[in-house]
Structure formats: structure tokens, C-alpha cells
Image (spheres, rainbow, N blue to C red):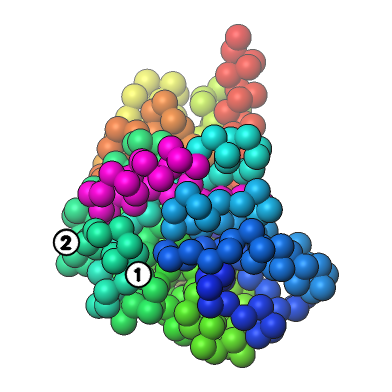
Amino acid sequence: MEKQLAILLDPEKANLDMLPISDSCHPDYLFVGGSTGGDTTEFVKKLRLKIEDWKLKIPIILFPGNSSQFTPEADGILFLSLLSGKNPEYLVNQQIKSARRIYESHMDFVPTAYILIDGGVETSTMRVTQTQPLDPTDVDTIVDTCIAAQMMGKKAIYLEAGSGAITPVSTEIIKAVRAHISIKLIVGGGIRTPEAMQSAYDAGADIVVIGNHFEDHPEELERFCRNVETSSARNLEDDEKFMRLAIEEARKALKKDEIPIGCVVVSQGQIIGRGHNLTETLEDVTAHAEMQAITAAAQTVGGKYLPDATLYVTVEPCPMCAGAIGWAQISRIVYGAPDPKRGYATYAPRVFHPKATVTAGVLTNECRAMIQEFFKSKR
């Protein structure tokens, strides 16, 4: 999946003239918000004029600290709920206060779980909301909170170490969360180098948000942008390459009148196992594509564990296959089309190995089209 960068601008502090944004160096999003206020409407108007001067199209997304920071001048809004805290004012009350205005504005909104993790400093979010962050050593509670967010219908998780954090969200936490959710994962707070940003991407973050660092060091934006472009191009190219090979396996299943699902297992850039659905051919309900590919991969390496492998499959694994993937200790799972009815995320979201990462949505349309055409032909 493409990795993206967002710059967080606080209306009370940001100096728009200091941002070295250009056609060759710009973020994917501009987040606007802060915990204490500022005139959001006027700030967004000025920001939009700057974007026009830059001759760019960068979405302005609201990241509101409370209902008063909503403005219809923006392009979208993260509809935040502070799930890491227990204060109902920021769990639901502020959302109720702003809901009608957002609804009537017809603005795009993303229901987002905002999860504050202790980054070693007292943040403005803590002071304003009178809540405590989650303990970064209690990974299980963090993961459980994220699973609950997805089950409640959130479309994104925002893991936040807080403004000016000494310690960013750890790669251990990001990997653990990524292994158990299939929705967008946003990570921010305390990220000060391209290397730290890359570590967050590698662990499973879809979007990295940087605020304070660019306020103090705007000249470093170019380094970060180059890193994002290189990372995204490399990861997406590889993922699409191997997903197309999984699609080839799915076509083999289709020719046998099997549900067209295909899978390949990759290690160090080489395919070590292939498989496609054979449940009808073998009259075996366990003969799913993943099971065939994992068995082939184990035979190739001469062992049952595959900790250095990535599994590519055209459709979200079912709980049975997810269990096998977990037992094989496969470190990365990439799938194409989601399966909300039978996919692992609905029934067994924690079944993968704790350190595994998940990338969803690679060549989704192609993977979904094969399944849809197959069942359409059966009607």
C-alpha cells in the first residue's frame, strides 16, 4: 500500500510562510487542529490561498480538539473519539455537539479512534481532556482498544504519542495493532527523522503525521518527502508484482471451476510456495489457497516455521487459514479484496503472530472482480 505523509498545523502556532512546500516536495495531507483552539476558519482560508499559490492540490483535513474547531472551509475531517481516555466529553459529547454541522456541510468525514500513548511528556491533550494516556508497555490493552474501535465501526486508528513526545509510538505497538486491524492506521508524535518515519511505515503505519518537528525545522521537509516517495514506490511495486502472481494462481482455480482465490508465499524476494483453491477438486474443505501455499513453502525451506516470509492472497484469509498463517509464524500478510462475511478480521482478529504486519487492499478491484464474476456465473 502507498505510504503517506501528513503535516499537522496548529492554527495558534503554525507559520505558513515558513513551509518550503513545492510541486516536488509536499505532503499528502495537511491536518489542521490543536487541543487549545485558534481561529480555525480563518486559518484554513489562509492555508487554501497558500495551496493555490503553490499550484497544488493538497487536501485540508480537520484534526479538531473540540467541536468549536469545525469549519466547513476544509475538505474533510477526522471525526475523532478519544478511546484511550474515559472522559465522556471527548468520547461522545463533543461529537454530538458538532455532528449536525458536519452532516449539513456534506463534508467527507472519517470516524477515527484517537488513542493517546504515553510519549514521556504531559501533552496538551492530557491537560485539556483530563485523561491519561495508555501505558506503552501494556501492548495487549492498546491492541484490545484498537480491536474494539474497529468493531465499533471506526474507519481509522490514530496512534498518538502526543505533541512534543520524547518517545514515539514503538514499532512493537504499531506491528501488534497492524496485525489485528484491517482499517487505516495513522501514527504521530515524536517522529523527528526520516529513519523513524520509515520504521513506522515498515511496522505497518499507513500515514505518518509530523507537526512540531517541521515547525522547528521546516527545511527538513524535503528529506522526509524523498523518503516517503522511495518507500511507497518500492513497497507498492513489490506488493503489486507478487499479488499479480497470486491472481495467476486464482485463475488456475477458476479454470477448475473452483472459487478463484490464489496465494503465493515469498521470502527474500523469491516465491517459495504457491497455491490456489482446490476444495472441490480434492473434496476437502481445508484445501484453501493459503493452506496449499503454506504447505509448499514449508516443503521448500524444510521446516514448518516461515518467520521471514510474506504471504500474498487475493482475498482476506478466513479464520482457518489465518490460524495456519499464525502457526507458521509468517511475518507479513498482504491481501487484495476484503471478506467482511468470512474474513479473519471479523471472527479472529488476533490470530496472526503478534509481530506480524498486515497490508490490505492491494489490487483490490482485480481480486474482487474475479470473485464477483464467478458467483454471477453461478446464479
- Span highlighted in magenta in the image: 75-98
> Observer-nearest residue: 247 or 157?
157
Mark 1 and mark 2: span between their CA atoms? 22 Å
Residue that numbered label 2 is attached to: 138
Could you tell me if residue 300 is visible in this image? no
Residue that numbered label 1 is attached to: 124
* Residue at x-position 48% and y-position 83%: 213
Q: Is residue 182 above or below residue 13?
A: above
Q: Is residue 338 above or below residue 221?
A: above
Q: How many marks?
A: 2
Q: Is residue 156 above or below residue 233?
A: above
Crowd tier of the residue under label 1, counting other residues whose Cα lies within 10 Å: few below 14, some 14–19, many 20 or above: some
* Residue at x-position 44% and y-position 30%: 340
Observer-side mark, 1 or 2, equals 1
Q: Residue 241 occupies which quadrant of the picture?
A: bottom right
- Give x and y (percent) for residue 307: 30, 62
Give the residue type that dot 2 points to. Asp
- Give x and y (percent) for residue 288: 39, 34
